[in-house]
Structure formats: C-alpha cells, structure tokens
Image (cartoon, rainbow, N blue to C red):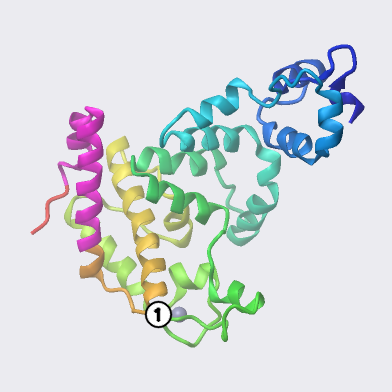
Amino acid sequence: MGDFDTRWANDFYCFDNICYIYGIPSNNFLKYYTLIKSIPIHIKSEINTNNTPCTQTTFVENILGRKNKTNKIFYTLQIKNPTENYKIQNKWQVLFGEKELNWKHIFTMPYKATIESTLRNFQYKYIHRIIATNKYLFKCKLSNSNLCDFCSENIETIEHLFWECKHIQPIWNQLISFLEQHQLNVNLSFLNVSFGINSLKSIDCNNIVNFMVILMKYFILNMKYKKQVPNFNCFVHSLKLKIQIEKEIALSNDTLQIFEQKWNRIKFS
Ligand SMILES: [Zn+2]
C-alpha cells in the first residue's frame, strides 16, 4: 500500500500517475479502484488529510460522462487485454480443433455487424460463454435437469443449444435458404454461426450475414427461456423488428445512407 500513497503530498497517487510511474497499462483502472476501495476509511482519512478527490481520472470520467457509449470503451479494453481472455479463447480453440481462430475478427465482428447494443452485448456474452445453459444451471443447482429444453434428450451445452439440437438444425437450414434467396451464398457451420463470416465479396454482405447469425442465436436463447421450440417465421418477424430498430438508430445518428446501403438487398415477401 505504501506504493499508493505519497507521504510528502498527504494523498494517493492518482491512477494516471501510477500508470506513468510504474508503467502499468492504462486499461487496468478497475484493479486500481478495487485496491483504493479496499483501504479502510480510517487509514484513508489519515493519509488524505486535505480531502482532495483522488479517484477521478479522465478514463473514468469518460465512462461516467457518456450515455450509451460504454460499449466502445469495454470493446477497447477487450482488444487491449488479450491475456484476460486467454482461458476462454483456449476453450473455443480446443472446440474448433486445428482451425486457427482469428480473435481480432471475432471481437470486432459484432461492432461491424450491428449498431444495436442488445445484439452487440449478446454476442459479447456468447464469445465469453456467459450463457445460462441447463448444463451450467444444473451444476449451480438452479435447474432440475441438465437436459435441453427443446429436445429433452441431450445435455444442454452451448454447442447443443445453438447448433446441434434436432430442433435447431432446421432453422439454420431455413436461414441458409433465406440468404440464398437474397444472393448471399454461405455455408453455415458451428464455427461461423458462432463468430460470423468474412468470406463474401462486400463488407455489407458479410455484415448482413453476421447480423443474422447473432440475431438467430439471440432468438434461440429467448425461445429457450420461453420453453418454445423456435420456428423460422417467428425469427423473420424478429428480424423485421430489429431492422426497424437499426433504421431508427440510423435516423437519429444521421446515418440513414449507411443503413440503406447495408439493408437494400433484403426484401420481405
Ligand atoms: Zn436439444
């Protein structure tokens, strides 16, 4: 703790100074605040006699001062902090075997695919495997069974719930046909429904497909919560709603042209 107070100043170093003096990466501010918070008040008040605020930094002010812009900051932290992600990345890597995963693409994909925060957040959780499957809930004694809510035959893992289940495979196939009807020919696998594609000629085409694979997974999870087997018509209905939301966000951001360029090839019969 001695490192965190300057006797000559009767105060703590602020986070920016700590980073500068000890060469700590500037994305470690949460650890700094945890540490400062853990110092008992009576010690703090003894050291910080002139009561100057010592916990404000431009970085935190940045977060607190922004409305709905925190995603970008957490995204920056994510990209800058690869060691924290190692365990989870390794888990996916083991699952997909020899195929080298492109983590830069994986982390940036949701931000390119959609401007809507619900879907971005969902994909963030998916990448980090923060999905309350029955396998997980059963382990925590929060569910009576670890079996899949749709088929009741297999253990409900992330892989089973979003891809392998016999009730889920048909809706992915229907999505492939839907995309084909719009000249978007893709070969969907568990790898690219998990992390999106990068193989189509235009950025907009990749973004449309990636938007749809995120939305489909989000839709599947919501149907799981409702304990209803997903059907493709309901998915199309939620797709229309989400496109409408993107349009409204684009209108308020004055980016309607970008919206139209992205979505003009998708027509609903
Ligand atoms: Zn199942």
Query: What's the amino acid at mark 1?
Result: Lys
Left or right of 204 in this view: 50: right
Left or right of 217 in this view: 257: left
Res. 168 in view: no
Q: Is residue 116 above or below residue 189?
A: above
Q: Give the quarter of the image for residue 7.
A: top right
Residue at 62% over, 32% down: 80
Coordinates of residue 20 in the picture (x, y in percent): 75, 16
Main secondary structure found in the magenta portion: helix
Helix, strand or loop at label 1? It is loop
Coordinates of residue 111 in the picture (x, y in percent): 41, 39
- Is 51 inside the magenta-drawn segment? no
Task: Please state the extent of the stretch shown in magenta in the rendering.
Answer: 237-265
Left or right of 166 in this view: 97: right
CB of mark 1 near ligand 1 (< 8 Å): yes
Q: Is residue 76 above or below residue 214?
A: above
Quarter of the picture containing the C terminus is: bottom left
- Is 240 inside the magenta-drawn segment? yes
Q: Is residue 184 above or below residue 169?
A: above
- Count of numbered badges drawn on the protein: 1
Coordinates of residue 203 in the picture (x, y in percent): 32, 36
Left or right of 214 in this view: 76: right
Residue at 51% over, 41% down: 107
- Circle 1 sits on which residue? 166
Quadrant in which ligand 1 is drawn: bottom left
- Mark 1 Cα shell of 10 Å, populated few (<14), some (14-19), many (≥20): some
Quarter of the picture containing the N terminus is: top right
Residue at 71% over, 19% down: 52
